[in-house]
Image: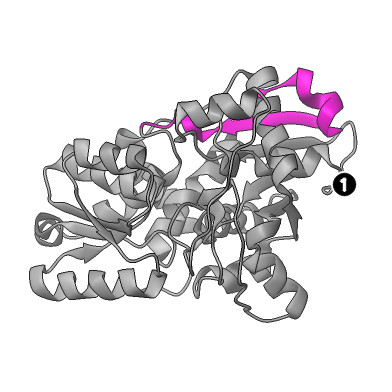
Amino acid sequence: MQQRVTLQDIREAAERIRPYIRRTPILREKNMDGIVNCQMYLKPEMLQVIGAFKLRGATNKFLSLTPEEQKKGIITSSSGNHGQACAYLGQMFGVPVTVVVPHDTPSLKVNNARAMGAEVILWDLDYDARWAKIHELVAEHGYNIIHPFEDSAVMAGQGTIALEVLENLSDLDTIVVPIGGGGLISGISTFVKESGSKARVIGVQATACAAYYTSRKNGSPTEVSGGSTVADGLACHRPGNLPYPIIEKYVDDIVVVGEEEILEAVRIVADKAKLIGEPSACVGIAALMTGLIKTRPDEKVCTVLTSGNWGIEKIGRILKGETVEGITRVQDCTNNR
């Protein structure tokens, strides 16, 4: 496995995945400017084919396999959007897909993956236990692993978001990206910095589960105990081996936001942009509206809205201002970013 992702990798990924993904728009949201103290642009990846950016990385990895490897099928562990992306690939290319998920995964996400033909195995809540199961199945069936973030081809696919943003907004000042496992921001920050753009790259985590933020403060990879958060897609308790050095090299700052701020950001995105983002997708807006990311009124800022695959009834409760409980994961970095 390559130990890094390059600018050329991302450009090649963009060409490779072009027929299979949507090039999501860059939306200028002037009515949000006063709330976030900048010129607000949104990259709405909830408009992606499966409702999340994850299809980019998973598709690039799958298409990087040989035809023989593809026929053997793919396997992953994900309790959310990455698993659905792999299931969609299986349906599209007619190959077997297995997704190993925590046994408390929301039924919506399990049912979505099964509806696309994937075999979903409900397994332990513990991250390491699930990956032990995956390696057991790989040894038995010869499946190919598509890891949510510990893979340079996956990171390159996610980095195509930055390519699209900068092609449309070459004078961008700042791009704000949610961080879970770290694959998304690794790809985005690599493209931004290696392309010669002067834009800042700012990562955002939920306060309850902030492994990369804590690691940066400590100066070394640090595992955190983590707590309950509505931003379940960001529930990562330790930095990824491949993303961590990339993030330390290219990401200008990492900030954390609390639960109430995240919920308010979901409401703002729905009210002002008319988009339904799951809480994990809206942490960048939360960081901007609370001033944790310092901006100027004339600064061009793009926030990546990563996904919208939450139960509509829970989104409805958020929009009505009702209480929505978060979830706790044990050493889980497989959900989302």
Question: Which quadrant holds residue 324?
Answer: top right
Residue at image point 58% right, 71% down: 244
Residue sticking out furthest to the right: 296
Examine the rendering and report whether any part of residue 301 can be seen: yes
Residue 176: x %, y % from top left: 69, 46
Examine the rendering and report whether any part of residue 169 can be seen: no
Name the residue beneath numbered marker 1.
Answer: 294
Q: Is residue 181 above or below residue 11?
A: below
Q: In this view, does 116 lie above or below 224?
A: above
Residue 284: x %, y % from top left: 69, 43
Disc 1 crowd, CA 10 A, few/some/many (<14, 14-19, 20+): few
Residue 142 versus residue 65: which sits nearer the camera? 142
Residue 313 versus residue 303: which sits nearer the camera? 313
Q: Find the magenta span and give its range.
A: 27-49
Secondary structure at numbered mark 1: loop
- Residue 145 relative to residue 260: left or right: left
Residue 131: x %, y % from top left: 32, 71
Amino acid type, mark 1:
Lys
Residue 34: x %, y % from top left: 86, 25
Residue at image point 64% right, 31% down: 42
